[in-house]
Amino acid sequence: MVNVTEISVIPDVNTSLMVSKTTTEAVASMFGPVFTKNAVKYTLEFEAQKLGENPPKGIETLDGAVEYIQKNINRYPDGVCSIVYGMAKTERVLEGYSASGSKRMAFNAVKKVMEDSGMLSSLQGSADQIFDAIAKFHELNSFLKVIPPNRFERQDNGAKMIVKNCTCKDACRKLAGEDFSRIIGGKECIILINHCAAAEIITGKRCDYKLEKFDQPACEGKIYAKEE
């Protein structure tokens, strides 16, 4: 039995940006135009701050925000953090501090990635254990290359996560500084959120997650099945 699944490949920046853009568009379809407007605003503010300049004027679309990030990728290589922050900040502003929006956002995003890859039907129901579902999600990432490097270890009721050099950490640090947390306690984690969504989609079980260590310097957490 395999007890460890690991991603070591660095994500492809442009693919990650496109997936993040698609995710934002999917969430905007639920919230309406106000989500896109705010996501663009916060994305540009974050990116400009990292570049040491004022946010550009006249950019009002997600395409424009992504182009701004891509144009400056040599100056700020972790530009995907800008759009991750923009999405998370907007979701918090619109829904408050409940984690429901983040989980729904991740579920829809991961499902869309699986659909676009043509693997959704073959993945759904292909594993009944959380760890095995995460291992299959990692196989999908082997050619998508959108997930930051991480390691998951099998546990009785789920899986333990260890992330040493997360490409989303800049966004998480800023959100943590703004006291962005879950209503049940603990900090949010984009890696745990997406893997939790993947586990739910593949196993059909209700799952949850908890970030236990943040930026120490690694991040550690777990995904587990919720009691019915």
Image (tube, helix red, strand yellow):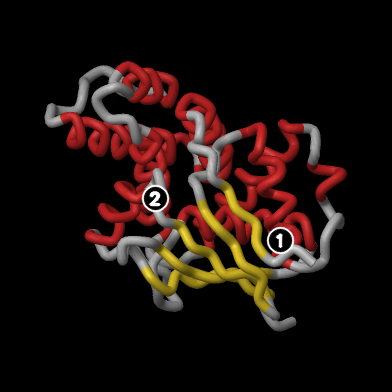
- Residue type highlighted by circle 1: Glu
Decide: few, some or many residues near mark 1? Use Cα within 10 Å; few <14, some 14-19, many ≥20: many
Decide: few, some or many residues near mark 2? Use Cα within 10 Å; few <14, some 14-19, many ≥20: some
- Residue 65: name its quadrant: top left
Report x, y in % for residue 41: 30, 34
Which residue is farthest bottom?
227
| In the displayed structure image, the side of residue 54 where residue 139 appears, left or right | right
Q: Which mark is residue 165?
A: 2
Report x, y in % for residue 163: 45, 57
Most foreground residue, 142 or 226: 142
Say whether marks 1 and 2 touch (CB < 8 Å): no
Q: Is residue 79 above or below residue 186?
A: above
- Residue 153: name its quadrant: bottom right
- Kindly state the secondary structure of the residue where label 2 is placed: loop
Name the front one of labels 1 and 2.
2
Residue at 35% from the left image edge and 66% from the top image edge? 214
Q: How many marks?
A: 2
Indicate the quadrant containing the N terminus: top left, top right, bottom left or bottom right: bottom right
Residue at 39% from the left image edge and 46% from the top image edge? 168
- Residue type highlighted by circle 2: Asn
Most foreground residue, 26 or 3: 3
Q: Is residue 107 above or below residue 4?
A: above
Report x, y in % for residue 99: 48, 65
Report x, y in % for residue 14: 48, 24
Q: CA distance from mark 1 to mark 2?
A: 25 Å
First in sequence, mark 1 or 2: give its number: 2
Q: Is residue 18 above or below residue 191?
A: above
Q: Which residue is mark 1?
A: 200
Residue at 42% from the left image edge and 63% from the top image edge? 188
- Kindly state the secondary structure of the residue where label 1 is placed: helix
| In the displayed structure image, the side of residue 195 where residue 33 appears, left or right | left
Residue at 80% from the left image edge and 38% from the top image edge? 119
